[in-house]
Each structure stands twice: as C-alpha cells, then as structure tokens.
Image (cartoon, helix red, strand yellow):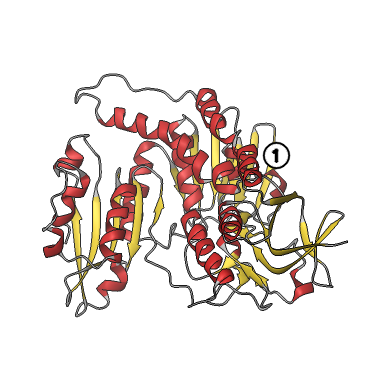
Amino acid sequence: MTEQYDVVVIGGGPAGTAMASGLKAHGKKVLIVEADLWGGTCPNRGCDPKKILLSAVEAQQSAQHLQGQGLTGTPKIDWPALMAHKRGYTDGINDGTLNGLKGQDIATLHGQAHFQSDGQLAIGDQVVSATDYVIATGQRPAILPITGHEYFKTSTDFLDLDQMPKRVTFVGGGYVGFELATIANAAGADVHVIHHNDRPLKEFDADLVRDLMAAMTADGVTFDLNTDIHAITKTATGLQLTADDFELTTDLVISSAGRIPNADQLELANVGVTFDRHGIQVNDHLQTANPHIYAIGDVSDTPVPKLTPVAGFEARYLVGELTQAGAAIKYPVIPTQVFAAPKLAQVGIGATVAAEQTDKYRVNTLDMTKWFTYYRFNAQQAQAKVVVEQASGQVVGATLLSDVADEMINYFTLLIEKHVTLAELQRLVLAYPTPASDLQYLY
C-alpha cells in the first residue's frame, strides 16, 4: 500500500529541512527525501567548509599586512591540519541533520526520487504519494563539455583535498573560481584563473572587479582572460590545457564555470513540470506548472541570487503558503559577496545603473584605505561605491571592496531595507571605533 503524506519534500539541504521542520510544526504529515548527503551542499561541500578554509587565509593575510607594523613572521598554511579542522565540522553534518529530523518525528527516506507517470513519487522500490510536493534539490557544479572533460575536478573535490597540488588552475571566473583561487594561492600553489572573456564576475561593478583582480595578481594569482579552453590532455608532466594561442600545464584543473540545477533525474515531464539550465520554472507563489508541486532554493528559476539564506527565506514563505495561502512572495534586498582577498560585496542598485540616472541617484565613490578602520590593520585596499536616492536621501545600493566588506554589506542591507536616512542614522550612537561607525560618512 502506498504511504500517503500531506507534503513530501525532495531534498535534505537547508531549504528542504527548513521546509520539513516548518510544516511539521504546523501539524502536517511530512516526508523528506535525500539522494546524497543530509544537510545539502552548503554545510557539507559549499559555503561552510569554504569559510573554514578561508579563516586560515584571513589570519595569514592579516599577519602579512602587519609585517613591520608590529608583527614579525608570517604564518604558513598547514593544509593537512586545516583540512582536518574542516572535516571536524563537515564529518558530523550528515548524521547530525538526519538525527535532527528524526528527533522531530519527521519521516525520512534516502535515495534518488523520481515522479512516475501516475503522479506518485518513487524512491528506489518504495512509492509514496502526497497532496503537495516541494522540490528543494539544489544545484551541482557544471562540467564544461570539452575534449578531456573527464580530467576536470569540481569545487567538491577541492574542498576535500588531502594535499594542495603545486599547480592549480580554475576554468571559469565566477564566485567559485575567485574564492577557491584565493585559498589555493594562500596555501602556496601556483594558481591560474582562466576566463573566456575579459569580464569575470560580471554581476559586480567592473571597476572594483579590476581592483580585486589587481590585488589578487599582486598576491600571485595569474588571470588568463579571453581564453576559451577547448581541450585537456594528460601528459608526463601534468594536465595540459590548450586554447587558441594558449597552453598551460597544471596538476589540478577545477571546472568553476557555474552550477546546474538538480532537476534532470526527477522525471518532471511525467507530472507536467518544466525546467531549463536556469532551474525549475515557478510563479510568484513558488508553484510550478503543476499546481501541487513547488520548487524552492537553488533548483528553482527565480529572479534572485542562489544563496543559502534565500533558500531559507523561500522555505519560510512556502510553509505559510501550504498552511494558509496568502500573497505572492516578496523578496527583500539581497546582499551577495565574493570571499576573495580582499572581499567584494554588493547589495541593491549598482553604480553603473545609477550613473545612467543622475537626476535620480547620486554615487559616492570613496577610497577608505587610509580611514582609521582600515589603517589599524594596514589594509592594502578599501573601496566603496554607495548609491543614494536624491529625493529621499536614502541609501539604495552599495558595492564594497575591503577586508571587512562581508560585514559592512549587512549594515547596508539593513539601511536599505529599513529606508534609513543620514539624519535617522545620526540619531543612533554606534560603538566606536568600529566599521559600523563609518556608515555616516558613506552617505
């Protein structure tokens, strides 16, 4: 007999687990299905382990900046010890997540799910049915379809390396390429980032991307732009990458050319659900073409960045929808960032867009490198472009490049979302000296 549930959640990552827990708290009979690791990409092989590795990079960089300014001797990264530190966290994620679900009395199944032609869901030899289904299967790294593509490794492999190779190459100049290149370079590898055109990180301000690349180049990273790799060949000396008028031999090559949705194994055509390389198509209630099937998180084709906190936001929204239907989803402003060295972060309206509407917006372009906040740790670079709406005096966008950009961007997110003017900000007393106390000088 087929087991019947109120909701079946497909995917045991941050979106899926938040969804299952929220529905269970509302008294729903819930099943959650996971094909790989419980907990999903972020804590197992994504943002969390990456940030653990970056913690050593940040400490090393801080020491380097203060050489001759009160510190002597730069620490070296002990990669095996750093990896053991990372695994001390990640090794417990799968079991901890599963035990947490079981502790809430949420039913779980492990295996690849797919929809049958009768609309029911099969997981191995088990078949289940539900009133509603929520797809939260996330994304996986894309592998470029070139000759020798079998030699590509991915971010998953990089974040679990036992030893750091002497030569590491990243093909693709997006978030992943920049962030992992920063880690590999700090760990002592000879690092190349290869990009098919001259505009890596195209979602970010071009000037600040150039500044970031200059800083990374000064630290030892080589950027090979306008280079379209067409083959990888294994040779006696390593892996040879070739393009028109370009050759490079490396020990490890990572495909960092984006991610693709985990939708292709669900047999969605059987239930009338459509998807493409951007994800599963949903409406503004996160509902697919099938009214009883929803998609949230990285697997969905929504007009927002694919980030863990966004997945959680969508899960909370959809829990409400499935318990008491309401209004369409409305996203707040969403910050995005690149954990490189220095860090690059942005939120809201960009300076390029604002510069095209000078009657509406003012752009404050600031070099903060000698400000006390950055002088105290001898920062090499601290830049900001802040967009202010002329009529209201409110900040509506910011792009930051600095060692503390990841913290500062959250302050700007609050200022934008809460429509805080300079006068309103100055009615607050913020701790000094801190990065937050600089905010009033950025309007």
Regarding residue 403, the answer to whether it shows in the image is: yes
* Residue 81 appears left or right of 113: left
Q: x and y percent of residue 197 in the render?
A: 48, 60
Tag 1: Cα neighbours inside 10 Å, few (<14), some, or many (≥20)?
some
Instruction: Count all numbered tags in the image, as a single digit.
Output: 1
Can residue 148 be seen here? Answer: no
The residue depicted at 34 percent of the width and 33 percent of the height is 61
Residue, far top: 72
Quarter of the rendering containing residue 121: bottom right
Res 16 quadrant in image:
bottom right
Please tell me whether mark 1 sits on a helix, a strand or a loop.
Answer: strand
Between 140 and 289, the one nearer to me in the picture: 289
Image coordinates of residue 396 in percent, x first then y, are 27, 68
In front here: 41 or 369? 41
Provide residue 115's location: percent of width, then percent of height. 78, 66
Q: As displayed, is residue 113 above or below residue 152?
A: below
Give the position of the N terminus as an image quadrant. Answer: bottom right
For this rendering, which residue is in front, 45 or 57? Answer: 45
Which residue lies under the disc numbered 1? 234
Q: Image check: 162 left or right of 224?
A: right
Q: Nearer the viewer, residue 350 or 7?
A: 7
**What amino acid is at disc 1?**
Lys
Residue at 64 percent across and 34 percent down: it is 238
Extreme residue in the front direction = 27
Instruction: Report the residue at 24% width, 55% height from top.
Output: 384
Quadrant where the C terminus sits is: bottom left
Quarter of the image where one finds residue 244? bottom right
Give the x, y percent position of residue 221.
43, 40
